[in-house]
Image (cartoon, helix red, strand yellow):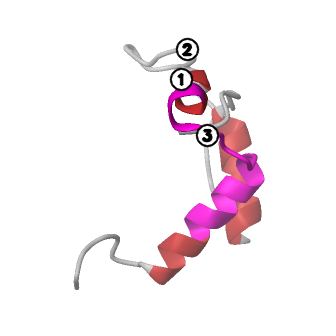
């Protein structure tokens, strides 16, 4: 679940660069056939049904993702 705020791919790239301290190489091109223009989710149901609401923004989410990846370099694998 997220905050219900949409982010562009470029915003995601910048946030992950900031969190990881690494440059992410990218190239801006046209959208591929079948790619969605935008995708949003409304977290209101989770707030009503579970009483839970996301408390952090994009930068904090990316920091947490990067920290988890560093601590789990093979993902969920036992190796």
Residue at the image position 67 percent from the left and 35 percent from the top: 3
Residue nearer the viewer, 69 or 5: 5
Callout 1 secondary element: helix
Residue nearer the viewer, 15 or 48: 48
Residue at the image position 60 percent from the left and 41 percent from the top: 52
Callout 2 secondary element: loop
Instruction: Say which residue label 1 marks.
Output: 45
* Chain-order first, disc 3 or disc 1: 3
Residue at the image position 42 percent from the left and 78 percent from the top: 72
Residue 31 in the image, given as x and y percentages of width and height: 51, 19
- The answer to whether mark 2 and mark 1 are in CB contact below 8 A is no
Viewer can see residue 54: yes
Magenta run includes residue 54? yes
**As drawn, is 53 to the left or to the right of 78?**
right
**What is the quadrant of the C terminus in the image?**
bottom left
Foreground mark, 2 or 1? 1
Instruction: Say which residue label 3 marks.
Output: 27
* Chain-order first, disc 2 or disc 1: 2
- Magenta-drawn segment: 48-66
Instruction: Say which residue label 2 marks.
Output: 37
Main SS class of the magenta portion in the image = helix
The answer to whether residue 30 is above or below residue 52 is above
Residue 69 in the image, given as x and y percentages of width and height: 49, 72
Cα distance in 3D space between marks 3 and 1: 37 Å
Q: Label 1 neighbourhood size at 10 Å, few (<14), some (14-19), many (20+)?
A: few
Cα distance in 3D space between marks 2 and 3: 17 Å
């Amino acid at each position: 679940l997220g905050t219900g705020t949409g982010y562009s791919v470029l915003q995601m790239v910048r946030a992950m660069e900031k969190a990881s301290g690494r440059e992410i190489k990218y190239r801006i091109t046209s959208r591929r056939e079948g790619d969605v223009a935008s995708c949003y989710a409304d977290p209101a149901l989770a707030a009503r049904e579970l009483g839970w609401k996301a408390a952090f923004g994009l930068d904090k989410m990316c920091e947490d993702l990067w920290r988890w990846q560093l601590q789990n370099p093979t993902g969920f694998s036992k190796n």
